[in-house]
Image (tube, rainbow, N blue to C red):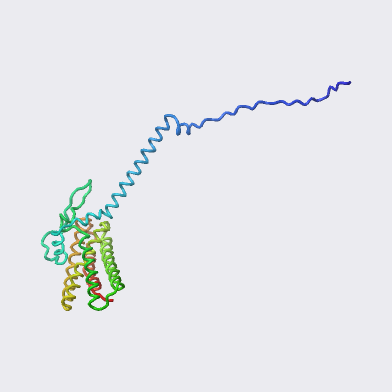
Amino acid sequence: MYYNQYQRTDTVVQRSPSPVYIQPNLFDSALYGGAGSNLIQSEVGAYGEKIVESSSEYMQRNMSKYFPDPHYYFQVNDDYVRNKLKVILFPFLHKGHWTRISEPAGGRLSYKPPIYDINAPDLYIPLMAFGSYLILAGLSLGLLGKFSPEALNAQFTKGLLGWFLEVMVLKVILHLLGSGDSPLLDMVAYGGYAFTGVTLAMLAKIVWRYSYYFVITLECFCMGVFLVKIMKRVLFTEMKSCEKHSSHRHYLLLFVAIFQIPLLFWLSNINA
C-alpha cells in the first residue's frame, strides 16, 4: 500500500458570517423618539392649529361679509313694516335721513337690525310682497277665465326672473362704480321691494282697470327714486366709493331709475 502524498482530502471549511453594522438614522431617532420628537411634534401641531384658525377666521369674515346671517333680515315688527312701506311706496315723503344706524360688533362695523332702523334692508316685506303678487296673479287669471296651474307656475317663474334681473342690475351698477362688496342679501332685499309697487298696481287694476295706468306710472317713478336713494347711500356711506366715478355715476343711477319702468310694467302684466 502506497501512500499518495499528492492525495487531496476534501475538507469543508465553514466560515462564520461577518457581523453587519447598521448605521443608525439620526433623523428618525430625533423625529420618532427622544426629546427631539416631542419638540417637533409640538411645533408641527401648533403650526397646524394656527393655519386652521386663520383659515377659519378668514372664511367666517368673508362669509359674513357676502352672506350675512339671514336672521338679521327678519327682525321686524308692525311699526317697521308700516313705516317701511311708506318709504318704499312714497319715498319723496320721507323727511328723515337715509343712512343706516351703525354699531360696533366683534371689532368690526355692523348695522342695527330693521326693527331698530327703518333704513335697514329686510326680507320680510319682499317675501310677503312676492306672495301677494302670486295671489293677485292667480286672481287676475281667474277673472280673465285663464286660470290653470301651468299659468300660475308661469307667473311664479316670471316673478323670480324679474327679481333676479333687478338684483343683477343693482350688483352690476355697484361693481361698475367700484363698490361690489355689498352683501348679496342686501341686494336681494332691495330688488324684492319692487313687488310692493307691482302688487299695488295689480290691485288697482282689479278694482278699477283705468286706475292701473296711473298707479303703475306713479310706482315706477317712486321705485326709481327709492333705489337711487339707496344706491347713493351704499356708495357714499357704506362702501365709501371714490369720487373718480362721479363722471358717469349719474348716468348709471339714472339707468337704475329708468329700468324700473319696463320691469314693473312687465311684472304687472298678467296673461296666460
Identify the image quadrant of the C terminus: bottom left
- Residue 83 occupies which quadrant of the picture? bottom left
- Residue 150 occupies which quadrant of the picture? bottom left
Residue 111 drawn above or below residue 170: above
Task: Please state which of residues 22 and 256 is positioned toward the viewer in this rendering.
Answer: 22
Residue 56's spot in the image, x, y percent?
A: 32, 46
Task: Please state which of residues 256 and 270 is positioned toward the viewer in this rendering.
Answer: 270
Residue 30's spot in the image, x, y percent?
A: 45, 32
Residue 217's spot in the image, x, y percent?
A: 18, 73
What residue appears at the point 30 percent right and 69 percent down from the top-left corner? 157
Task: Please state which of residues 177 and 49 is positioned toward the viewer in this rendering.
Answer: 49
Residue 175's spot in the image, x, y percent?
A: 28, 60
Task: Please state which of residues 51 and 229 is positioned toward the viewer in this rendering.
Answer: 51
Residue 209 drawn above or below residue 162: below
- Residue 152 occupies which quadrant of the picture? bottom left
Residue 52 drawn above or below residue 34: below
